[in-house]
Image (cartoon, grey):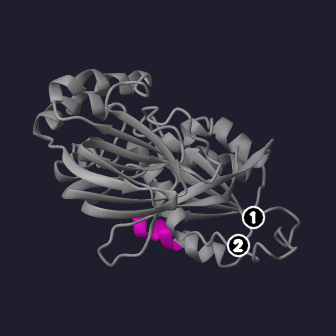
Amino acid sequence: MYYFIVNPDAGSGDAYSAWVKVQRTLERRRIQYEACISESPEQAEAYAREITARFPDRQSRDADSSDGQPDVIVVVGGGGTLNHVLNGLNTGRRFMLAFIPCGRFNDFAQDMHLKTGHRAPLRQVLNPRMNAFVDYGSVITGQGSGPRRFASGCGIGYSASIAAGAVESPPRRDDRKISRVHIPSTSMGRLLRFHTTPGWIELDGGRRVSFRHIAILSVQIHRYECGLKIAPTADFSDGLFDICVVSGSSKILMTPTFASLFTARHMNMRGVHHYRSREVMIHTERAMPVHVDGEFLGYHTDLQLGCAERQLRVIM
């Protein structure tokens, strides 16, 4: 059985166009499916929670639905839609997850080699050649809220400030997501107003690393953040975060480092530090903007992150 969770507004309306074509194909081929059209992120999350409640436990031998086919949840939308669906899923149940990405420069889809449009992604869903068990991350902001899951990565600092700007000063389109298109047009203005902060990260085994001037702190499951290959060596199924810290006191001296992010040549640049860890605690002396999968979470000083290893079975 196929369960489609659709955000028709994603990708500035691209998701609606894709869904109309997908639905037409499903009807023509007489494929049994159920569609849930989301009017808000909270509704997409609720749909995911309700749907997975119907499935058997992962420990159960009955991994398939009553008609002998695997249960597949298909997300039609952007990275934000996927993020909210992920937060509603009961990962202890048996199902496969598929994604029909809409819009441009989707980090999760880019790393999983998922095509855009509707024909090729739907073909992958209906006739899957392979699937993979992948990790997901979770973050606790330390303000009494529960953990927030993320599929691709969590960004703190300069990159997240662009997400903050997209929310605080929305563009004409109702699109709060950040992408590679937004970064060049807004990066200089944000860079002039952005301030680094002292802080530290604590890795597995209690190892603590301090920094005097944190500009970017990216905790990644996948290689891409905002369309940029921020963690070129990340493995989405190894149970470890790839953590990239960009630190420097001078914006002028850091300009080549920021520029190198667009070409993925930053790993050996001065002020760039790379770590791997299953869990990480982060503290900054000044509240910094935070995003997960391009969704702005506000300004925070303390974060606690953990990686759930190979908990999502994703069609590729």
Q: Residues within 10 Å of mark 1 (few under 14, many from 20)?
A: many
Spot occupied by residue 218 in the image (x, y as percentages of width and height): 39, 45
Residue 282: which quarter of the image? bottom left
Q: Say which of 91 and 13 sits in front.
A: 91
Q: Say which of 189 and 242 sits in front.
A: 242
User: Are the two marked residues, 2 and 1, in contact with CB atoms closer than 8 angstroms?
Assistant: no
Q: Mark 2 points at which residue?
A: 93
For label 1, the SS is loop
Taking the image as drawn, is residue 127 in sight?
yes
Q: Which residue lies furthest to the left in this view?
A: 193
Q: What residue type is labelled 1?
A: Asp
Spot occupied by residue 47 in the image (x, y as percentages of width and height): 54, 71
Residue 123: which quarter of the image? top right
Left/right of residue 19 with respect to residue 123 in the rendered view: left
Q: Say which of 174 and 307 sits in front.
A: 307
Quadrant containing the N terminus in the rendered view: bottom right
Q: Residue sitting at 83 percent across and 69 percent down?
A: 63
Spot occupied by residue 299 in the image (x, y as percentages of width and height): 23, 59
Question: Which stretch is magenta?
Answer: 41-46
* Mark 2 → mark 1, Cα distance in angstroms: 10 Å
Mainly helix, strand or loop, the magenta region?
Answer: helix
Residue 262 covered by magenta stretch: no
